Image: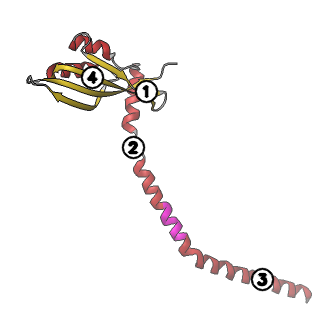
Amino acid sequence: MKGERIWKAAALALAVLAVAATLNTLLSAKRHREILARKEADLVQIQSHAGRWEKEDALRAGLEARRAWKPANLDEAATRTLGANMAKITPRPAVSAADGWQSREVSVDLRDVSYGEALLFLSAAAEVQPAWRLREIEIKPSAEAGKGAMTLVLEALEKKQP
């Protein structure tokens, strides 16, 4: 008799626990659906950012493969295309990029040059990999047609040298 009561009490306790667990699940379902919806929205946002740097990674990998670690020497390019002492080149501090690379910027002041010569200078700066890229330009025309003063900001990637 006593064993039968223990089994009935245990069965009743298990039934009460099952009902409590069921109620807990039913009552918390809405909260869990909201959590899953937020996580799904976060996943969509993360996936939208995936692959965002593929082009930059491919560029760096290509430069690494070609061992193109330093951009063209702008002083030489300016002397070759514009003549001696025609450009004032002022380097700016380098900014660390990724995987041992850094972003290098320079300010180039050109005084009284023809626009064609300035274009030749920019072409010379871009012909060596990694290429210098024109980031900003300010043109101050002179009284003579096709000539003026320019301030250029060029940027390029450069491999940090140990």
How far apart in space, not on screen, are marks 3 and 2 (Cα)?
Answer: 56 Å
Which of marks 4 and 3 precedes in the sequence?
Answer: 3
* Residue at the farthest right position: 2
Relative to 46, is 34 above or below?
Answer: below
Residue 11 position within the rendered picture, expressed as x and y whole percent measured from the top left: 78, 83
In this picture, residue 32 sits left or right of residue 55: right
Label 1 with label 4: CB-CB less than 8 Å: no
Which of marks 1 and 2 precedes in the sequence?
Answer: 2
* Residue at the farthest front position: 143
- Split into 4 quadrants, where in the image is the N terminus? bottom right
Q: Nearer the viewer, residue 60 or 16?
A: 60
Magenta stretch bounds: 32-39
At label 3, the amino acid type is: Ala
SS at circle 2: loop
At label 2, the amino acid type is: Arg
Residue under the point 22% across and 11% down: 83
> Which residue is labeled 3 in the image?
13
Residue under the point 30% across and 12% down: 76
Residue 21 position within the rendered picture, expressed as x and y whole percent measured from the top left: 67, 77
Type of secondary structure dominating the magenta stretch:
helix
> Which of pointers 3 and 4 indicates the residue nearer the eye?
4
| Magenta highlight on residue 33 | yes
SS at circle 3: helix
At label 4, the amino acid type is: Asp
> Which residue is labeled 2 in the image?
52
How far apart in space, not on screen, are marks 2 and 1 (Cα)?
Answer: 26 Å
> Which residue is labeled 4 in the image?
109
Label 2 with label 1: CB-CB less than 8 Å: no
| Magenta highlight on residue 116 | no
